[in-house]
Amino acid sequence: MSTWIPLTPLETLADGTYERFECDHADVLVFREGNDVFALEDRCTHDDTALCGGYYFNGTIACPRHGAHFCIRTGEALSPPAYEATTVYPLRISEDGLIEISFDA
Ligand code: FES
């Protein structure tokens, strides 16, 4: 059984934006596209630096250092100089409207 950790109310994250959360297991970026939410580890696999601050557009985030793009749904590296995916974490929306994350997988 998964442990779900509350992050923030869905309503506080505007559609088309993302927010960074510092969790015990990892720092994560949570993206909102309509009523869907996605979580990536805040780590570019090119040089193990933060993705936070990167440009988020059309389902991707661009690393602010050298511009590698990552898919926010799968974590896949879509352009060089990154070639490895970054970690994706499962999210859910609780009955109370909270975005919750699991690190159990
Ligand atoms: S550190 Fe992200 S592309 Fe280089």
Image (tube, rainbow, N blue to C red):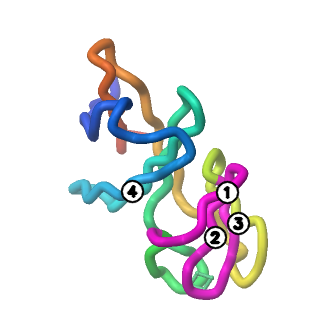
Q: Quadrant of ligand 1?
A: bottom right
Label pair 1/2, CB-CB below 8 angstroms: yes
- Compare residues 104 and 61 and report the one nearer the observer: 61
Q: Quickly name the residue at label 1.
A: 57
- Residue 70, percent from left and from top: 66, 63
Q: Earlier in the sequence, mark 3 or mark 4?
A: 4
Alpha carbon separation for disc pair 1 and 2: 8 Å
Q: Earlier in the sequence, mark 3 or mark 2?
A: 2
Instruction: Indicate which disc, 4 or 1, sits on the residue closer to the N terminus.
Output: 4
Q: CA distance from mark 2 to mark 4?
A: 15 Å
Q: Nearer the viewer, residue 53 or 82?
A: 53
Q: Mark 3 and mark 2: span between their CA atoms?
A: 10 Å
Indicate which disc residue 62 carries. 2
Q: Nearer the viewer, residue 58 or 88?
A: 58
On whether ligand 1 comes within 8 Å of the CB at mark 3, the answer is: no
> Residue at image x 60%, y 60%?
56
Magenta-highlighted residues? 52-71
The circle drawn on residue 77 is 3
Near mark 2 (Cα within 10 A), the count class, few <14, some 14-19 or many ≥20, is many
Left or right: 57, with 8 as reference point: right
Residue hosting label 4: 28
Q: Quick one: SS at disc 4? A: strand
Provide residue 49's location: percent of width, then percent of height. Answer: 46, 81
In the drawing, what numbered circle is on residue 84?
none
Residue kind at label 1, given as amino acid type: Phe
Question: Of callouts 1 and 3, which one flags the residue occurring earlier in the amino acid sequence?
Answer: 1
Q: Amino acid at mark 4?
A: Val
Q: Is mark 4 within 8 Å of ligand 1?
A: no
Q: Residue at x 54, y 74 (%)?
A: 44
Say whether residue 57 is magenta. Answer: yes
